[in-house]
Image (spheres, rainbow, N blue to C red):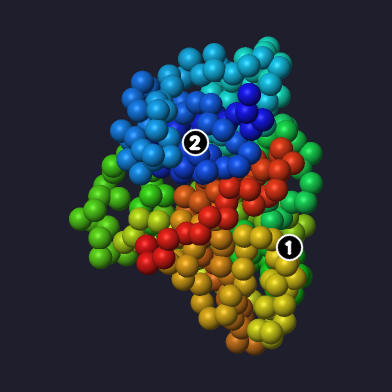
Amino acid sequence: MSDKIPAVVLGASGYVGGELLRLIAAHPDLELAAAVSGSAAGKPVATEFGHLSQALAGHAFTAPGEWLDKLEAGGKLALFSAAPHGASAGVIAGALESLAARDVRTHVVDSSADFRYASQDRYEDVYGTTHGAPQLLPEFTCAVPEHTDDVATAHVGHPGCFATATLLAAVPLIRSGLSDAEVFVSGVTGSTGSGKSPQAGTHHPERNSNLYAYKPLAHRHAPEVAALTEAASGRPTRVHFVPHSGPFARGIHITLQARASIAETELREIFEKAYEHAPFVEVVSGTPRLKNVVASNMCHISVASDGDGVVVMSAIDNLMKGAAGGAVQWMNRLWGLPETAGLTAAAPGWT
């Protein structure tokens, strides 16, 4: 019998699900028990993700109603959800009920938006839909790992990809008390952030060699960032956010501006101190470049100041640090594993 923790991925045939499968396949302490997908049930994993044909040879997608049969009663489970916003909560609730009946000790990390707000009313206000499992909200924490030392809940809702990049740039600045608690953020994301299903905004002829803003000052990540920044810093923060669609597949680059009378050297020291024990955040010289973080779980941050205003720049891979990699990082912590387990393989260059 393997002493690895069984792992199940819900919504496994999407982009985030595929990244979770890739990471689990190489993880020293997790072992894939089921890749759950209604649309791809019964198909070999390699039919959806050709790049995983060797890593997950012999694995096929499991139908939603069949994966519980693969688990031993009284065991452990690392349950990842990459199910869509609005659907994930209900699926998780049903799974936890069945797992409890079989005495399976479970930790959940959800990559959807369903557990990013502590309040049912706030979630429903932002997403315009009824929450699928409001009774579970007290059992979830939402934060990036770097801003939370101890987690009192059994489960985690991972922040969104834009939110992750922005929080890592905003929280040390706001927490320092040396700037206004108001930030202006411009972010550019790759097309994989829109999911696997084709749509007009991610159609290649429209996006290639193009750059455009969307939902300026009205994107739903803005209230999420504001709430999580306040939770991590203790200061209510106004967030003005303009997202952009970039002509590349993976990565997010954000530029955050705020008013602050602080020298650049002091500002850099604030960030270096904030992340001195964070294995996946590096304060870099110059400016962050997507090619240095894509396919890794790293966030690269740099800063600038002109005397009365500051800029903080942040770059991550949206599918890794912003979703699947951050989810594995959280799962490592929930199970008491090394935080870096399964996340330190060298990323390819010149992506």
289 w.r.t. 157: above or below: below
Give x and y (percent) for residue 235: 74, 60
Would you name the residue on which mark 2 appears?
82
Q: Amino acid at mark 1?
A: His
Q: CA distance from mark 2 to mark 1?
A: 28 Å
Left or right: 272 as drawn, with respect to 63: right
Name the foreground residue: 212 vs 265: 265
36 w.r.t. 148: above or below: above
Would you name the residue on which mark 1 appears?
277
115 w.r.t. 174: above or below: above
Give x and y (percent) for residue 337: 71, 43
Give x and y (percent) for residue 309: 61, 80
Task: State the residue at coordinates (62%, 63%).
Answer: 281
Give x and y (percent) for residue 222: 55, 54
User: Sequence order check: which comes first, mark 2 or mark 1?
Assistant: 2
Q: Is residue 56 visible?
A: yes
Left or right: 173 as drawn, with respect to 343: right
Question: Where, quadrant-wise, is the C terminus in this rendering?
Answer: bottom left
Closer mark to the observer between disc 2 and disc 1: 1
Residue 74 falls in which quadrant of the image?
top right
Within-10-Å neighbours for mark 1: few <14, some 14–19, many 20+: few
Task: State the residue at coordinates (63%, 16%).
Answer: 72
